[in-house]
Amino acid sequence: EPEVTQTPSHQVTQMGQEVILRCVPISNHLYFYWYRQILGQKVEFLVSFYNNEISEKSEIFDDQFSVERPDGSNFTLKIRSTKLEDSAMYFCASSRTGTEQYFGPGTRLTVT
Amino acid sequence: KNEVEQSPQNLTAQEGEFITINCSYSVGISALHWLQQHPGGGIVSLFMLSSGKKKHGRLIATINIQEKHSSLHITASHPRDSAVYICAVSKGGADGLTFGKGTHLIIQP
């Protein structure tokens, strides 16, 4: 069964460094999403992407964040200059129709 | 902005018990999702509802659109059902999900 994959599973970085989190959505899906979950807190929406552009973004998704779909299969989230408070689990999700979403296993980002 | 409230926050029950988890939301939606998150962190979609009731194995989900309320029931609960159950809502399309805080369920043998 097709699934969403994410790499790496765990990323440790120093404050101020740039990180790129990678996702491979399910191949015939058209909608792509990034979410984050700070340890012990609820999952929060960051951004959605459709038709090669950002569709919606939350107030969390500031100028430090960007998303790309560079090659028609990967979907990336870049954090330009990481802060301690960016430490979280980051989930990618995809959807064919914009209804049911399929989640990847997550990338645990630790900023030291 | 939609507010999603779940109850209870924590639930411990004995194997075989009937479990109910509740979810309420504040603004009209296109769909409500029930998700399961295991200790490793991965999220699995259990149900997506826009009306009525759905059943999958021992899991049943219902939604009352007028009352903005949904319930997730687990019949004949088993220790492997132990997980965090999360309610989330959306307007559909590119709209991201708005999540509740989750219900941490422990089923003891």
Image: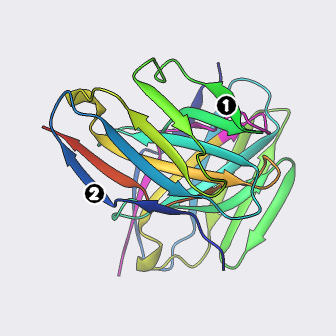
Is residue B96 located in the magenta-colored stretch of the structure? yes
In the picture, measured across the screen, residue A70 lies left or right of residue B90, that is left
Amino acid at the residue labelled 2: His
Residue shown at 72%/38% (left/top)? A52
Specify few, some or many for label 2: CA neighbours under 10 Å numbering under 14, 14-19, or 20 or more.
Answer: some
Protein image colouring:
rainbow
| Residue B29 in the image: above or below residue B75 | above
Q: Nearer the viewer, residue A49 or A59?
A: A49
Q: Which mark is residue A10?
A: 2
What range of the chain is rendered magenta?
B89-109
| Image label count | 2
**x and y percentages locating residue A39 in the rendered image:** 29, 43
Residue shown at 42%/44% (left/top)? B9
Please, which chain is the residue tagged with disc 1 on?
B
Amino acid at the residue labelled 1: Tyr
In the picture, measured across the screen, residue B12 lies left or right of residue B68, that is left
Residue sitting farthest toward the front: A71
